[in-house]
Image: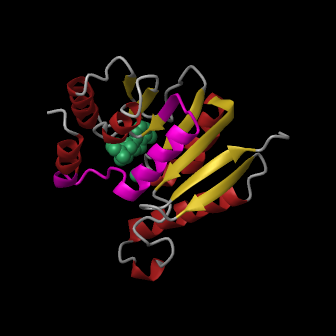
Amino acid sequence: MNNIENLKQEALTKHIPIMQDEGISFLLRFIKEHHIKHILEIGSAIGYSAIRFASISDDIYVTTIEKDEDRYMQAINNINNFNLNNRIEIINGDALDIDIEGQFDLIFIDAAKGQYIKFFEKYKNNLKDNGIIVSDNLSFHGLVADPSKIRNRNTKQLVKKIKKYIDFLKTNDEYETVFYTYGDGISISYRKNDK
Ligand code: SAH
Ligand code: MG
C-alpha cells in the first residue's frame, strides 16, 4: 500500500491522531515556501505526517521519534512501502530520554501534549539559527478555548498544560510565536534575531 489516502484512512480507522487536513496542508505549503530541507518530528505515530513531509520533494530529510513500539513498527512498514527509508529516519524511544545529533530547519512537536515545554526546551538545541519550531494541537478539539465542555479530570489537566505552553510561548523572549487556527491549532515559533 503506497497511497497516502489509504494510509490516512487506516490511521483514522485505528483512531490514531494524525494531523488534520487543514493543518497538514498549511504546514506542507510552509515547508515548500521556506525551502525547508531537514525536519525533526517528535511523535511519528504510524509515519503519516513524516511521509507527507518527505513526499514534498526528494531533497527533504526527516528524522522522527516514536516511543510506542507497535506504532514504530507500523511506521517502519509504511515508510518502506513509500520507498522513503532513505530519507526518513525513525527512532524508537522516548524523546525526553534520547539525544539527537544534528541541526534542523524545522522541529515539529506533535507528541504528548502535557510535555510540550520540555520538548521545546530540549530540542531547541537542535535548531539551526534561522530554524523554526512548529507545535500541533494547541486547540485540543476546541477545549482550550472552552474548557467548560470538559467532563474528564485527566483532560482538564492536559488542557491546563496546553494553556501553560501557550503562555510559555507568548512570554518567551528568545522566540516570537504566531498562532494559527488551522486544523487542531498550530503555532510557529521563530528565534528572535538579536538573541
Ligand atoms: N505526527 C503524527 C501524529 C503523532 S500522534 C501524524 O500527524 O501523522 C502522537 C504520537 O506521539 C503518538 O504516537 C505517541 O505514542 C507519541 N509520543 C507521545 N509521547 C512521546 C514521547 N515522549 N516521545 C516519543 N513519542 C511520543
Ligand atoms: Mg497532532
**Image coords of residue 145 (percent x, y):** 51, 75
Up-down: is 154 above or below 28? below
Question: Which residue is most to the right?
Answer: 194
Would residue 20 be visible to someone looking at this image? no
Magenta-span inclusion, residue 18: yes
How did the renderer colour the structure? secondary structure
Q: Residue at x 50, y 60 (%)?
A: 138
Q: Residue at x 35, y 38 (%)?
A: 52
When asked about the image quadrant of residue 44, the answer is: top left
**Image coords of residue 160 (percent x, y):** 53, 66
| Quadrant including the C terminus | top right
Q: Residue at x 68, y 45 (%)?
A: 190
> Which stretch did the figure color magenta?
12-40
18 relative position to 121: left or right: left
122 relative position to 6: left or right: right
**Image coords of residue 69 (percent x, y):** 27, 32
Name the foreground residue: 25 vs 146: 25
Would residue 51 be visible to someone looking at this image? yes
